[in-house]
Amino acid sequence: MEQSLLPRVRSRLIIEMLGSPKAHVEKTLKDYVAKLRTDKTVQILKEDYAETQDRDGLFATFVELDIWFKDIHHMLAFCFDAMPSTVEILEPRELKIDAGELQNLINDLQARLHTVDLALKEVKATLKVVDTNAMNALRNFTIYALQQGTKTPEELGKIVGLSAQTMQPYLDKLIAANKIKKDGNKYSIA
């Protein structure tokens, strides 16, 4: 592999973690830093762990790292992988970058952005399918429940596992589609 013409980069970064249980969050963060220590492209000079805080049943902690990276390419790759909340470049104070090196940095950045964009589009497509399937299941449960007789939103909610308030927009859609009808506070098959 071609030797980078870029200088080493020293950065101070903060990596945050949120999850549960507390011991798992703390261990996962420490394991991540331990694995990072084995990476030949970085040299960790200092690591400071914060006290873990309880945030409504989830546990949050962070580590501040002082790291030398082989070059800015490796620092940017780290930033995409670790998603630090802050990055401060300590050294060098100025970077002089050859146009070819800058081009490589931009192309690497673009490739990573395209990968993230593709993953996001796949997640959105999956969520759309899941949402459609959930709506169909909710419609089928509601219609099945109403085949047994008229029901209030509360009764329907208990059957399908939703609150009456959450049920209301779905019931309104089923009325608009002429699948069900409303008489007073009760619903039945149209």
Image (cartoon, rainbow, N blue to C red):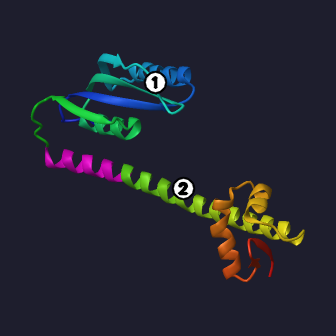
Of residues 163 and 22, the one drawn nearer to the viewer in this rendering: 163
> From the viewer's perspective, is residue 23 above or below residue 18?
above
Q: Which residue is mark 2?
A: 123
| Magenta segment boundaries in residue numbering | 98-111
Count neighbours of disc 1 (C-alpha within 10 A) and say few if under 14, some if 14 to 19, many if 20 or more.
some
Q: Is residue 101 magenta?
A: yes
Q: Quadrant of residue 15?
A: top left
Name, please, the residue furthest toward the right.
148
Residue 3 seen in this snapshot: no
Q: Is residue 157 above or below residue 78?
A: below
**120 lies left or right of 140:** left
Q: Which residue is mark 1?
A: 29
The numbered mark at residue 169 is none
- Quadrant of the rendering where the C terminus is positioned: bottom right
> Which residue is found at the position 32% from the left and 29% from the top?
14
Up-down: is 176 above or below 96? below
Could you tell me residue 135's position as x and y percent? Answer: 68, 66
Relative depth, front residue between 1 and 58? 58
Kind of residue at badge 1: Leu
Q: Is residue 96 left or right of residue 148?
A: left
Mark 1: secondary structure: helix
Q: Which of the two discs, 1 and 2, labels the residue nearer the N terminus?
A: 1
